[in-house]
């Protein structure tokens, strides 16, 4: 390709979004990540009464087009712990069933005073559409196979808290220096994998993606230079300080057929495999887990597991994200 | 009788290898004379256009547009779509049949081609190859051909069944018209909304593979070979909007074998890659999708070496509310009539060094030949006075808001264009003036 023809390509269209939106981890700078971690730590230390005044009287809408346990509950409890009023709209019990568009649903919530919308949606990029069309800060709580940025942030915090000698209140290009994170399973359909693979290398981590070709195409390497594909789970585990297991997303397989017995043999994280190849590795899972499939019960409940800590970090990180969304840019100073 | 003179222009007529200063006299909707400057001084014309510094060329011809009428006139009408065509320098457009209802009957075709629709430029149509474009039963090719059909296509819904496609190619060959095929193996593209590759992976969107396009092109070429052998016919396959190197390789090889295969390329495919989708910009969503850089380069190479026969826009208007949706839900298609020339000159002429004559041939003489339009695509005396006059040196930026189309769904809003249409004349009438 000549430089000339390259320069003739059109620049892609730039869109702008309300400050405080979190649509993708690629849209936040390392400095902002650091700010989110700092505020998360401060919020955790804060007395309950003080915390509950931070967003008193503010309105937050949860707009859920897909089922959710952890994300929805943690966002809702986070909002309430800051004193905000929340309302939940789900596709099953709203005018969405009658064919109302995402844009109109968003505009309706805005007209009702929602200052921030937390969106979970089965379609990749839905949070971008909502943010663009409403101008309201949007927190992407998982959009299709695209991203789940708040999950990556809470995973980051969990890793920093659990690995020795790391500071969970700041993020630098060296925060995860020397750390190899293995993400194993249904990478293709996983928004959690994408957000982590895009975020963790910014802090110096190496991300190894692991899984069979149908669930992990070579195109995944396009996520960035900090990402590598390793098909052999045992070989990947040997290098791992952190191992993240993912569920096979039956609802997104779209006709793809897998031999589950073979999958379990090759990719299940069980006690034997962990002891043999990565006895000290931190074990993570964004949930929901299918015990006996991608992970065995003994590992999920074992001493290496950070799974429950991930959930509790979800609450604190999402509190910080809500504060950020409703503070128009200057949120660190709100609770300095 | 009103004569019109176009004076002092640089007249480019690729068919006649003409690229020189000429004066052109139009009379009764035809080109009456084309002479060296000053030779027509004695003619007293009712109107004179001074084309000094401008190119005077055959009006552009687009064999692939969607005008949405009947049935979806909130997106476009024949009147608004042909007004956009005129503004883009086009004097002839060929309407695709995916209207509501599908253009699959003589009655429907006549309605579409009626002067009551108020087309501003010359309108032709390719009716459906199968009833309702359902891929099962052929339409009445002979009757539709007699009523003006230039060819047949189920555009957007490829004819997948081998037997039906074979039947269609045979029936069209007997009439001497092409079957125009949207090459997509839809068995491979369910749920897909963009090109397969690293960008699709990052965006979490399911991708259409190169194979899905190539497989249908390869299958259709195999059918041509079989028909040539068995039926002693020479069927004409026209491959729409080729977007992949692999499909182009198949077309190139078929041409070398002497098969009658032609293909078109769309300006967006030679200008943009799938990176242009950026933040889920639904105005960069169309089918076939924007591809990777290697495929864009393959399209450019095909345009340069003649594998690509013509440029066609696949002008596909959609209303704002349809594009303001989740990427996967938004309909495919972008407008293209007003940006085609400006992109072709910028990317192909300035960028790739193709001559103006070559580009104008790709946009006039070549498409005229594909659909056998007599007296169009050339400025030879006696031809229809279909003319575009443009300034080849003007750099400008397209504004979607200024479009004549009813819809503004273009990824080229604000994009740099080279060359600006100053006037468009259709059968001697001035249908657009800058």
Image (cartoon, rainbow, N blue to C red):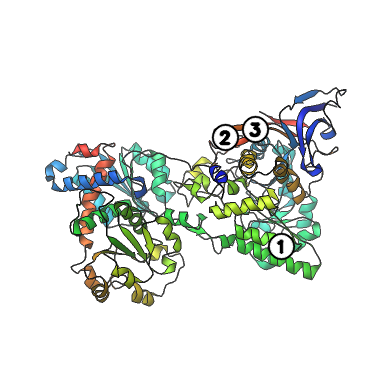
Q: As drawn, which residue projects farthest toward the right? A: B42
Residue situated in front as seen by the camera: B101 or A190: A190
Residue at 47% in and 41% down: A13
Chain of residue at mark 2: B
Say left or right for A218 vs B266.
left
Give how far across and how far down residue A80 sits, in percent.
Answer: 21, 46
Q: Which sits earlier in the primary sequence, circle 3 or circle 1?
A: 1
Secondary structure at numbered mark 2: loop
Residue B14 sits in quarter: top right
- Residue B398 is marked as 2
Tell if the residue under mark 2 belongs to the same chain as the one under mark 1.
Answer: yes
3 and 1 marks in contact (CB < 8 Å):
no
Secondary structure at numbered mark 1: helix
B255 is higher (above) or lower (below) than B340: below
Say left or right for A165 vs B409.
left
Q: Which residue is mark 1?
A: B254
Residue situated in front as seen by the camera: A9 or A264: A9
- Label 3 – label 1 distance at C-alpha: 38 Å
- Label 2 – label 1 distance at C-alpha: 38 Å
Chain of residue at mark 1: B
- Residue B393 is marked as 3
Give how far across and how far down residue B104 sits, in percent.
Answer: 69, 53
Q: Which sits earlier in the primary sequence, circle 2 or circle 3?
A: 3
Residue B364 sits in quarter: top right
């Amino acid at each position: 390709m000549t430089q000339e023809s390259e320069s003739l390509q059109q620049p892609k269209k730039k869109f702008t979004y309300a400050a405080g939106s979190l649509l993708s981890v690629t849209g936040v700078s390392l400095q902002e990540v650091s700010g989110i971690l700092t505020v998360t730590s401060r919020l955790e230390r804060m007395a309950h009464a003080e915390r509950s005044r931070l967003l008193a009287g503010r309105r937050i809408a949860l707009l859920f087009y897909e089922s959710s346990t952890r994300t929805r509950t943690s966002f809702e409890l986070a909002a309430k712990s800051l004193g905000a009023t929340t309302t939940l709209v789900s596709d099953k019990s709203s005018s969405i069933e009658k064919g109302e568009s995402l844009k109109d649903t968003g505009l309706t919530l805005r007209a009702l005073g929602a200052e921030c919308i937390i969106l979970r949606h089965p379609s990749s990029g839905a949070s971008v559409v909502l943010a663009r069309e409403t101008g309201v800060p949007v927190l992407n709580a998982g959009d299709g196979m695209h991203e789940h940025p708040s999950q990556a942030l809470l995973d980051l915090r969990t890793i920093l808290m659990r690995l020795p000698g790391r500071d969970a209140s700041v993020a630098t290009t060296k925060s995860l220096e020397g750390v190899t994170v293995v993400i194993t399973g249904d990478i293709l359909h996983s928004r959690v994998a994408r957000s982590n693979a895009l975020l963790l290398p910014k802090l110096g981590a190496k991300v190894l993606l692991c899984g069979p070709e149908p669930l992990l195409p070579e195109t995944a390497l396009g996520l960035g230079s900090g990402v590598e594909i390793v098909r052999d789970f045992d070989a990947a585990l040997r290098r791992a300080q952190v191992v993240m297991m993912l569920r096979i997303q039956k609802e997104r397989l779209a006709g793809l057929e897998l031999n589950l017995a073979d999958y379990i043999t090759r990719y299940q994280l069980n006690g034997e495999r962990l002891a043999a190849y990565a006895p000290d590795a931190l074990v993570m899972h964004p949930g929901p887990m299918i015990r006996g499939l991608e992970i065995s019960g003994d590992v999920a409940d074992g001493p290496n597991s950070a799974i429950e800590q991930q959930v509790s970090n979800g609450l604190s990180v999402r509190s910080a994200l809500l504060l950020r969304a409703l503070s128009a840019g200057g949120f660190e100073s709100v609770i300095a | 009788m009103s004569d019109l003179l176009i004076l002092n222009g640089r007249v480019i007529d690729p068919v006649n290898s003409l690229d020189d200063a000429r004066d052109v006299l139009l009379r009764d909707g035809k080109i009456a004379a084309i002479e060296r400057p000053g030779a027509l001084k004695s003619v007293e014309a009712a109107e004179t256009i001074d084309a000094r510094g401008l190119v005077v060329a055959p009006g552009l011809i687009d064999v692939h547009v969607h005008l949405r009428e009947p049935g979806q006139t909130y997106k476009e009408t024949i009147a608004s779509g042909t007004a956009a065509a005129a503004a883009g320098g086009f004097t002839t457009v060929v309407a695709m049949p995916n209207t509501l209802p599908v253009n699959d009957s003589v009655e429907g075709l006549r309605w579409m081609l009626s002067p009551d629709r108020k087309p501003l430029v010359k309108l032709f149509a390719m009716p459906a190859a199968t009833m309702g474009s359902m891929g099962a039963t052929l339409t009445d090719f002979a009757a539709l051909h007699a009523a003006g059909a230039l060819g047949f296509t189920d555009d957007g819904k490829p004819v997948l069944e081998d037997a039906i496609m074979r039947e269609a190619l045979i029936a069209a060959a007997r009439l001497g018209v092409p079957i125009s095929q949207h090459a997509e193996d839809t068995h491979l593209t369910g749920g897909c909304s963009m090109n397969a590759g690293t960008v699709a992976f990052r965006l979490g969107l399911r991708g259409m593979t190169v194979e899905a396009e190539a497989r249908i092109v390869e299958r259709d070429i195999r059918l041509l070979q079989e028909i040539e052998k068995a039926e002693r016919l020479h069927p004409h396959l026209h491959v729409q909007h080729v977007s992949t190197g692999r499909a182009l390789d198949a077309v190139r090889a078929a041409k070398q074998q002497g098969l009658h295969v032609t293909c078109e390329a769309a300006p967006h495919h030679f200008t943009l890659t799938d990176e242009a989708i950026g933040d889920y910009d639904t105005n960069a969503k169309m089918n076939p999708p924007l591809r990777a850089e290697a495929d864009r380069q393959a399209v450019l190479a095909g345009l340069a070496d003649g594998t690509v026969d013509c440029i066609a826009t696949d002008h596909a208007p959609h209303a704002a509310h349809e594009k303001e949706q989740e990427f996967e839900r938004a309909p495919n298609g972008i407008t293209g009539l007003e940006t085609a020339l400006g992109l072709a000159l910028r990317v192909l002429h300035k960028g790739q060094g193709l001559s103006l004559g070559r580009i104008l041939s790709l946009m006039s003489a070549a498409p005229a030949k594909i659909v056998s339009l007599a007296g169009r695509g050339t400025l030879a005396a006696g031809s229809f006075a279909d003319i575009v006059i443009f300034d080849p040196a003007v750099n400008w930026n397209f504004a979607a808001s200024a479009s004549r189309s009813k819809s503004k769904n273009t990824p080229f809003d604000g994009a740099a264009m080279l060359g600006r249409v100053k006037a468009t004349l259709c059968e001697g009438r001035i249908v657009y003036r800058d």
